[in-house]
Image (tube, rainbow, N blue to C red):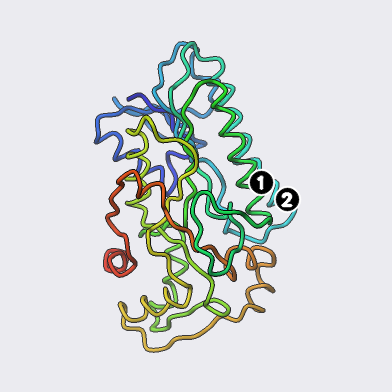
Amino acid sequence: MKLLITGGTGFIGSMLLERLCADGHSAVVLTRQTDLVDSDTVQYVQDLAAIPDDAPFDAFINLAGESIAEGRWTASRKRQLIDSRIETTRALRTLAQRLQQPPSTLLSASAVGYYGPQDDTPLDEASPTVNCFSHALCVDWEAEARAFEELGMRVCLLRLGVVLDNGGGAWEQLARSVQFGVATYLGSGRQWLSWVHREDVVAAIRFLLEQPEASGAFNVTAPEPVTNRGFCDALRDEKGAVITLPVPGAVMRLALGELADELLLTGQRVLPRKLEALGFQYRYPTLAEALPALLAS
């Protein structure tokens, strides 16, 4: 396949690009970096306008978007989070409209924040939602992606959980204290963490790329979410930490404001029903299986 990938140099995209090329695919990658060198299978562009109208693509993979978990959600920060998702998706649609032959498929990132904070309720792709900033952000992002269906394209929405792996993402923050023999949990620790290993995210994207009948929203999370305290205890036991300490919610709110309430002190118990129904096989379905690999480096 010939693919166009946004966010192809990011935490998920870099591994995905490597695996797709190993599968025999080629890609054009939209990036802000200017020092990357093209190869036989990968071409880097800084502007979609550089892509000619007769360029042949089989699929778009849209992973672009600034990290939602970095810094307080000020008004200007919220605007950046919205624009980095909405404007890139709209630019992709403009490209698809001008191509002589639009691609058949769009795989577009979203997040489990779509569901809003939901306590202990198990959530699948058809579950009701709770309104909040992260929910509204995902709703608008997904709406831009669904508009590609008007061009006759198959659209898969990737509702990503908290992606864990060495070398970046949330893992470094979650595991930082245990390096010093202390395992920490946030607030009450009862909030659910819908996690997923990066290897399984990449595998799920490759899987959906090859499923021509698959469309709509897909929860890209491990089959067994854990509570924040459960994650802390499992990490403590695996690493051999000697102390377990809570980080008070009041401290988190003082430091991070709205972000703390929506992303850290509340959560969602999200289940990947549709992926499992299609027969997708996880490499790391449980935290017990994932932690040895995460702690290996």
Residue neighbourhood size for the residue with mark 1, other residues' Cα within 10 Å, grouped as few (<14), some (14–19), many (≥20):
some
Give the alpha-carbon distance from disc 1 to disc 2, as whole Å.
6 Å
Q: Position of residue 165 (x, y in %)?
A: 36, 58
Vertical position of residue 120 compared to residue 148: above or below: below
- Relative horizontal placement of residue 152, taking residue 224 as reference (left or right): right
**Mark 1, residue position:** 80
Q: Relative to the observer, which residue lies in front, 279 or 41? A: 279
Identify the residue at the far right of this view.
75
Q: Amino acid at mark 2?
A: Ser
Q: Which mark is residue 8?
A: none
Vertical position of residue 50 compared to residue 86: above or below: above
SS for dot 2: helix
**Mark 2, residue position:** 76
Q: Position of residue 49 (x, y in %)?
A: 55, 20
- Pick the quarter of the image with the N terminus: top left
Quadrant of res 204? top left
- Name the residue: 51% across, 58% down: 123
- Pick the quarter of the image with the C terminus: bottom left
Q: Relative to the observer, which residue lies in front, 219 or 84? A: 219
